[in-house]
Amino acid sequence: METLTIGIIGAGRIGRLHVDNLKKISQIRIKSVSDLVIDHLKSWAKEKQIEVLTKDYRELLDDPEIEAVFICSPTDTHAAIIKEAAAAGKHIFCEKPISFSVGETEEALEAVEKAGVKLQIGFNRRFDLNLRKIRNIVQDGKIGQPHILRITSRDPQPPSIEYVQSSGGLFMDMTIHDFDMARYVMGSEVVEVSAAGAVLVDPEIGDAGDIDTAIVTLKFANGALGVIDNSRRAVYGYDQRLEIFGDKGAALADNNRPTNVEVYTAESVTKDKPLYFFLERYTQAYIAEVSEFVTACLDNTEISCTGFDGLQAQKIAQAAKESLETGAPVKLMQESPIN
């Protein structure tokens, strides 16, 4: 059986999650992990049977045995590492966003194309079975011509202020998943963005120059409209819902819960609260996305979540920020059709 040898760049929460999920795939060998702070990772690396632990990611890129890398380092390093990895002939899985600059992202994508390597962006929600089914329903015409898309995405609690300060802001860090999902489900590009935001959860987020609550309105090239609502704190859990309405019907994806049991009494009707956070909600989606990447590298198949998808979501996020700052809608150039 052919094996794909992988290196992981960045061993924070998401990097370690990918290691755990990759370990479930028989065709992979995780040879190396790099992180600027490695002393606390030594026992973890030994437990995961990782052969090399280093502070310098370039050791991974210089290793001829490593065929693919996962870029899980801070966002401001992504574009540069993509270019270096592409030049080294490595296939690349990169967490979102690719960068905070459209120009930097375009340069990185040009390097990937020139090198002829594969690049997958970590929009894991595309691999959620419920959301993938919604997309298939829309593509099959079961709800007819789409008219309205509604996405609710609310975290159970805000991140640390240190994280907020380096995140690129709510639209680039959090809503970017919803922007990608809007394109994915609708099968049409976003051509206009309007955004409103507020600081209603934590004043320190406002002091850091960000918002914690937002409403974004989208116009699509196919004429449909979309609305996304975000909050950094939903006291009842991780709130992830989507509805798409068309001229022949509607399709809805509700929250995942620990059980689907509902209890009916004279006093109330109750059911479980939503799963608490994204690691629980999207467990299978994370496994599915890395499995597809491994298959694409080994079998030379197509990537379904490409650098172009990352670029488009990034452009929508920047347009939302511009709209928030100016109070006016922002138009986007219509790009190549979505496959």
Image (cartoon, helix red, strand yellow):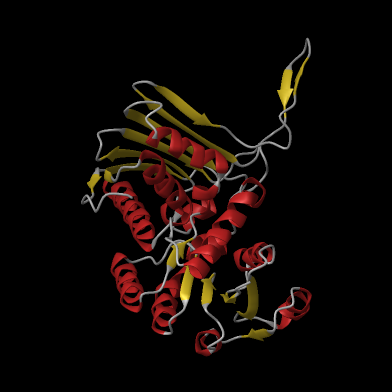
Q: Position of residue 167 (x, y in %)?
A: 48, 62
The residue located at (45%, 63%) in the rendering is 120
Query: In the rendered picture of this protein, how many numbered marks are placed on residues?
Result: 0
Rendered-image quadrant of the N terminus = bottom right
In this picture, residue 115 sits left or right of residue 64: left
In this picture, residue 284 sits left or right of residue 139: right
Query: Residue 82: which quarter of the image?
Result: bottom left
The residue located at (72%, 18%) in the rendering is 269
Q: Is residue 65 above or below residue 182?
A: below
* Most distant residue in the front direction: 1
Q: Position of residue 176 (x, y in %)?
A: 43, 52
Query: Residue 315: which quarter of the image?
Result: bottom left
Q: Position of residue 332 (x, y in %)?
A: 23, 50
Q: Position of residue 293 (x, y in %)?
A: 52, 63
- In depth, the one of 27 and 215 nearer the eye is 27
- In depth, the one of 103 and 91 nearer the eye is 91
Query: Residue 109: which quarter of the image?
Result: bottom left
Q: Is residue 277 above or below residue 22?
A: above
In this picture, residue 215 sits left or right of residue 51: left
- In depth, the one of 166 and 309 nearer the eye is 309
